[in-house]
Image (cartoon, rainbow, N blue to C red):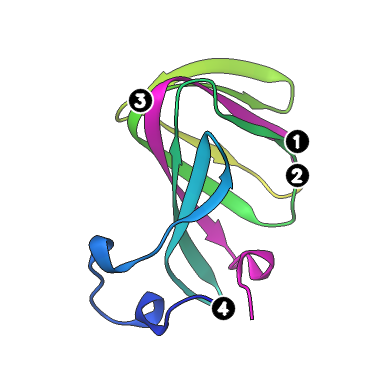
Amino acid sequence: MISEKTNSLFLHDHELSWEVLDEKVKRKIVSYEESLMVVKVAFKTGGIGPLHQHMHVQITHVESGVFEVEIDGQKKVLKTGDAFHIPSNILHGAVCLEEGVLIDVFSPMREDFIKI
């Protein structure tokens, strides 16, 4: 279950828990409301965000590391400080080339990420 802290006005990263997706990828919900969600995703080198699509618009900031990102069949290598934009229902995924963290912003929120 997601902590009520994710809906607070002020958030402390060390108080938010990680959800382990596999041995190389974990995520934490930073904050959300119905129209918006911020998620931090940490990757070890070789971690994969498999190709998928969803109705949500997504903008992602590369907080650290190096990633090969594929969006709608186009691949680019992005590194710390770069970002990418994924329109609704576009196939996309990422491979971590050097350990790092992505900050995902979704609109509307990803209800499928919330466990009740």
State the image coordinates of residue 66 (x, y, percent, origin top left).
40, 20
Earlier along the polypeptide chain: callout 2 or callout 4? 4
Find the magenta span and give its range.
90-116
Name the residue beneath numbered marker 2.
53
Earlier along the polypeptide chain: callout 1 or callout 2? 2
109 vs 39: above or below: below
Using the numbered discs, state the Cα–Cα distance from disc 3 to disc 1 in whole angstroms. Answer: 22 Å
Magenta span contains residue 103: yes
Q: Nearer the viewer, residue 93 or 17?
A: 17
Does dot 2 land on a helix, a strand or a loop?
loop
Using the numbered discs, state the Cα–Cα distance from disc 2 to disc 4 in whole angstroms. Answer: 19 Å
**Which part of the image, by quadrant, shows the C terminus?**
bottom right
Name the residue beneath numbered marker 4.
34
Earlier along the polypeptide chain: callout 3 or callout 2? 2
Q: Residues within 10 Å of mark 1 (few under 14, many from 20)?
A: some
Residue for point 49% across, 46% down: 26
State the image coordinates of residue 80 (x, y, percent, origin top left).
31, 27
Name the residue beneath numbered marker 3.
65
Name the residue beneath numbered marker 1.
91
Does dot 1 land on a helix, a strand or a loop?
loop
What's the amino acid at mark 4?
Glu
Earlier along the polypeptide chain: callout 3 or callout 1? 3
Q: Residues within 10 Å of mark 2 (few under 14, many from 20)?
A: some
Using the numbered discs, state the Cα–Cα distance from disc 3 to disc 4 in whole angstroms. Answer: 30 Å
Using the numbered discs, state the Cα–Cα distance from disc 1 to disc 4 in whole angstroms. Answer: 23 Å
Q: Residues within 10 Å of mark 4 (few under 14, many from 20)?
A: few
Q: Residues within 10 Å of mark 3 (few under 14, many from 20)?
A: many
